[in-house]
Each structure stands twice: as C-alpha cells, then as structure tokens.
Amino acid sequence: MLVTVVQPNPQAGSPHVSHAVLLESCLPDSFRLRNSYPSDPIITIPRNRRTSHQNFIRDNSGDFSLSAENVEKKFEFHSGVKIEWDKPDEWILADTGYSMKFKWKTQTRT
C-alpha cells in the first residue's frame, strides 16, 4: 500500500516535505515503511505519533474555540492512547486518503 508521509523541513524554508512510501508492515507498536531515499531506506513511525490532520487541528485549535492542550486531550481520549505530539522533526503519516483499484480488462474482438 502506498502512503504519504510528511516531515517538517524548516531549513528549506518550507513548512514540510511530503513523500510517498510503501507501507511494508503494520507492527503492534509502529508502521514500517519502505522509502526510496537511499540515505533513509526504512521509515518507522510509532502508532501513537500524531498524524498530519491531528497536527493541523491542534495548530488551528483557536478556530474550534479550544486550546491546543484541550485538542490533544480530546484526540487522546478518542484514540485510547497517549499521542506523541513533541517530535517536530520526525516523519508523520499524512492521513488524507485515496484509493486506487486496478482491474484486468479483456479486449473484446469485433
């Protein structure tokens, strides 16, 4: 399965770097992703690390009349795990989804 990951990149002057990777395995405590970057061939993301959407909601908590701390508590309550919020330079899952389905198409003769 192809997934997208995001990594903050303040040195480049942009807010983040997005990148598609292959979900290699779902381990009990993490996701193991195969990366095309030779310098970083395997990315491991803990299951309890925040996602890009959770990060966006927390960063814009004022739009929801909530504090960032309150947003964190609500996400942790509904997910049932202590979410890892304070790893600003680590890869996170971009949890906007899409799906593709491929089918064999047989050619009909006329």
Image (tube, grey):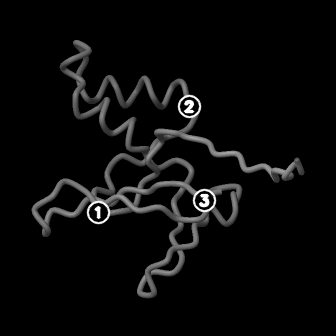
Q: Position of residue 66 (x, y in %)?
A: 25, 17
Earlier sequence position, callout 3 versus callout 2:
3
Label 3 – label 2 distance at C-alpha: 16 Å
Q: Are marks 2 and 1 in contact (CB under 8 Å)?
A: no
Q: Residue furthest bottom?
A: 38
Which residue is more in the foreground, 95 or 54?
A: 95
Q: Position of residue 18 (x, y in %)?
A: 35, 58
Other residues around mark 2 within 10 Å, as few (<14) / some (14–19) / many (≥20): few
Earlier sequence position, callout 3 versus callout 1:
3
Q: Are marks 3 and 1 in contact (CB under 8 Å)?
A: no
Q: Is residue 80 above or below residue 65?
A: below
Which residue is more in the foreground, 55 or 103?
A: 103
Q: Residue furthest left?
A: 13
Residue 89 occupies which quadrant of the picture?
Answer: bottom left
Q: Residue at x 53, y 57 (%)?
A: 46
Q: Residue furthest front?
A: 110
Q: Residue at x 81, y 50 (%)?
A: 105
Q: How many discs mark residues in the rendered view? A: 3
In the rendering, which numbered label is found on residue 79? 2
Residue beneath disc 1: 89
Label 3 – label 1 distance at C-alpha: 17 Å
In the rendering, which numbered label is found on residue 31? 3
Q: Position of residue 52 (x, y in %)?
A: 38, 43
Label 2 – label 1 distance at C-alpha: 23 Å
Q: Residue at x 40, y 62 (%)?
A: 19
Q: Residue at x 24, y 24 (%)?
A: 61
Q: Looking at numbered disc 1 in the image, what kind of residue is underneath it?
A: Asp
Q: Looking at numbered disc 2 in the image, what kind of residue is underneath it?
A: Ser
